[in-house]
Amino acid sequence: MSPRPIPFPGFTPISDRVYLRNGNEKSKPVPADEPTTIIISGWGDGMPKHVSKYSDGFHELFPSSRIIVILSGTLQASNQQEEARIEAMMPVVDTIFPTPTGSGGEEERVLIHAMSNTGAIFAAAAVVGYQRRHGTDKTFPHKLLICDSTPGSLDFASQVGRWSHAMAVGTAKFFPWPAIITQGLWYIFLWANWAFERLRGSEPSGVWANRVMTDKSITSTDSHRLYLYSKEDEIIGWKDLEENVAGVKALGWPVDLEMFEGSPHVGHMRLHPEQYWNKISNAWKQAVADK
């Protein structure tokens, strides 16, 4: 039996982790300058009351767009097997693409907003799910992929401290002891999980997601990418992100970056809302202009 969806005011649950908010019904069909669908793949252990601030911001920018939110746990991102990750995202695929091109009406114009490594992992799972449903000769149709505080380095040994910190922050409400103890426990868990994956020959989820999102047979280079980051991010190193982005650009994707001053991990919108939403609005305009 699947877990029951958690309460998410304003959204209709599609599954226990996927939620739908429709756009303004008065604007049908959706105006050509707006996305038909926005996918927000939330950061690890992001709560509805926090993620809803992003859905509200997108609704203000694009009031006619339907919004699909994916809520996921950091543990799911790090420990869930590939097939289970993909299966969990099939409700996203089937809602947007009951046929390879969409609902059969207007062309789908999809904006994906992946937040932190967890959001990127499950965005990648949805992209792969599309091929599972409609054929490996097709790439996931979307206009813009926004990577918010992701990706960083994929080297486990150098990053496990950052990742254990992220998991400690996300699960702090469940433990009564100091955060340093929680981080230590997650640090041990991550090393144990890494060793287990090596023994069974499975690919780490972050490495898998990065491979999916840089595979031209899965993710079309016709789409644009926007990376939002800061030097103060305590989980994603800015030099690691820029190095990753340089590789993506070399592969042929149109790429834009926006650096924010002083903002923590997944905290750019909170500290710099005007800069944040203006950049997203401009990136979308550029993506739809370059058809």
Image (spheres, grey):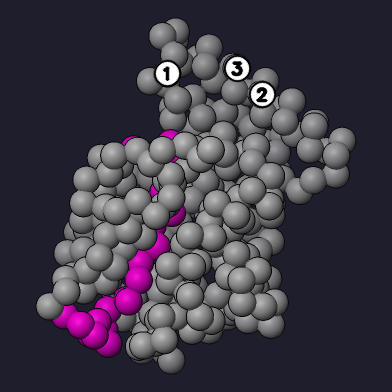
C-alpha gap between disc 3 and disc 2: 6 Å
The reply, left or right, for residue 42 in relation to residue 120 is: left
Instruction: Residue 184: name its quadrant.
Output: top right
Above-or-below relation of 53 to 126? above
Neighbor class of circle 3 (other Cα within 10 Å; few <14, some 14-19, many 20+) is some
Say which residue label 3 marks.
Answer: 185
Residue at 24%, 82% in the rendered image = 30
Instruction: Residue 189: name its quadrant.
Output: top right
Q: Which mark is residue 189?
A: 2
Q: Which mark is residue 174?
A: 1
Instruction: Name the amino acid type tagged 1.
Output: Phe
Which range is magenta?
A: 27-47
- First along the sequence among labels 2 and 1: 1
SS state under label 1:
helix
Q: Position of residue 163 (x, y in %)?
A: 57, 34
The reply, left or right, for residue 193 in relation to residue 77 is: right
Neighbor class of circle 2 (other Cα within 10 Å; few <14, some 14-19, many 20+) is few
Above-or-below relation of 243 to 291? above
Whether tag 3 and tag 2 are in contact, CB under 8 A, the answer is yes
